[in-house]
Amino acid sequence: MSESEHNELSGAAALEAARRVKLRKIEEMGVDPWGQRFDNHSAIEKIRSRESEITSEPAAEEGKPPKLHGPTVRAAGRIVLMRGQGKLKFLDLHDWTGRVQVAIGMNQVDAKSWELTQQLDLGDIIGIDGELIRTKVGELTIFATAVHFLTKSIETPPEKHKGIADPELRQRMRYLDLIHTDGSWERFRRRIKIVQSIRNTLAGEGFVEVEGPTLHAIAGGAAARPFTTHHNALDTDLFLRIALELHLKRLLVGGIERVYEMGRVYRNEGIDTKHNPEFTMIELYQAYGDYRSMMDLTEKLIAAAIEATGQEFKLPWGDKEIDFTPPFARKTYDELFFEHTGVRGDDAAGIAALAEKIGFETANRHPDVIKSHVFEEMVEDALIGPIFVIDYPASLCPLTKRKASNPSIAERFELFIHGMELANAYTELNDPDLQEQLFTQQLAGMAQEDSMARMDRDFIRAVRHGMPPTGGLGIGIDRLVMLITNTQTIRDVILFPLLRQEAE
């Protein structure tokens, strides 16, 4: 351990010791330092909204400021700033709706409240009774008449001006990030509004929300590597779900015509600014719809989510902008391929040459797989959007209905915004024989540890009973929140992203 680290640890220990001295003093006063029920307090946001109730009366002496009178209020929250000496102390009290200044004067509170005030530290949670008025400089302030101690903070919070600079530390210690990082709680509050808006919009469209299993005997519904576990009582291996699709489609067969689930899925893959091993997505299915129905619904869901956060459709994205004004652009896969590469989508030799140029091995690869890799490398990052990329090569989409006019094309879209895939939708394949055939082709040669290495034969059996023509849609909720809140990494829109285990 370096000398600076030793000194830092020694300093932290001394600060904690000082806080524990105050803890004992509070106990000696007969006060519970961990608090009791504190009824009838109001949210700080609501307290601040009562500013209009403040009145004034002329001063008794000429030249003196008018005397202010305000409503009696009761607040509770955490101390995030303290200042003042002698007989008057100021502090900032913070709850999940906002912040307000509190003034505690020795001559305005009882002796016990003043003695408690001397034991306060940053991070302590207290209750305040008082009068809401403005200071001489116009700062809205609760002038305390009583102080109630609710919880002692033993750990010293980050320095006010430094905050938590290390992103990983903010994500690991989210509790401190929410308290001390400007905008952190507001970002997650917007996430809550976005999720609620999606549910409200779907309810208005007649959809019902269900809960499917998170443990699957067969990993299916997506091409991804699953997490595995073992059930002891049944002595069987299981998988954490990689998608929501196949169970929701079973419900379509069962007659639930508009159905969705929003929940966590798990993929045992890499971590970067757009990927976390567990993430939230929504999948929904609408009987008697198609992928065009899903485009319209996607626009409606996103527009309502933005409105729910109180923002306009033109939003910042880093130093760029996203214009979410509906309708979004729609272009075919092959149109965009030619636009960004100069090679036609049916020019297999030209596409193979592009693939080799970017270092992709083409030997023994299906032409559409080669084309897909080139599209990912040379087209996707260039898509500013929002843009619906429609009509994908059918061989890449085993769960998708083919176009009647061209069976080599699948009725599928992906929504891209600044190179990020946000949504994926199909006109769902409901021909059970073709579905089984395509599954068989896809599974051939697939590594056993990959997803869908076994066919879900019960799903095929369900579709044989008759699944109606259907439009299906999946949206990555975390990525949607990133885009609406101008957040550049997925870890900052997930409350507790997966991190390396902390060193002991």
Image: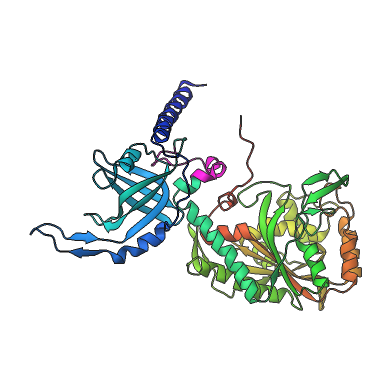
Residue bounds of the magenta highlight: 157-176
Identity of the residue drawn at 82% across and 72% down: 254
Left or right of 272, for residue 427: right
Q: Tell me, yes or no, if residue 347 can be seen here.
A: no
Q: Residue furthest left?
A: 62
Q: Position of residue 337 (x, y in %)?
A: 69, 65
Query: As displayed, is residue 124 above or below residue 65?
Result: above
In what quadrant of the picture does the C terminus appear? Answer: top right
Whole-percent x, y for residue 416 in the image: 63, 63
Residue 432 in the image: above or below residue 30: below
Q: Is residue 175 magenta?
A: yes
Instruction: Determine the residue positioned at 77% across, 63% down.
Output: 245
Scheme of image coloration:
rainbow
Horizontal relation, residue 115 to residue 450: left or right: left
Which residue is nearer to you in this view: 460 or 60? 60
Taking 349 as reference, is 503 left or right?
left
Residue drawn at x 41%, y 29% is 21
Q: Quadrant of residue 471?
A: bottom right
**Count of numbered badges drawn on the protein:** 0
Q: Nearer the viewer, residue 300 or 208?
A: 208
Q: Residue 180 in magenta?
A: no
Q: Is residue 50 above or below residue 496?
A: below
Q: Quadrant of residue 425?
A: bottom right
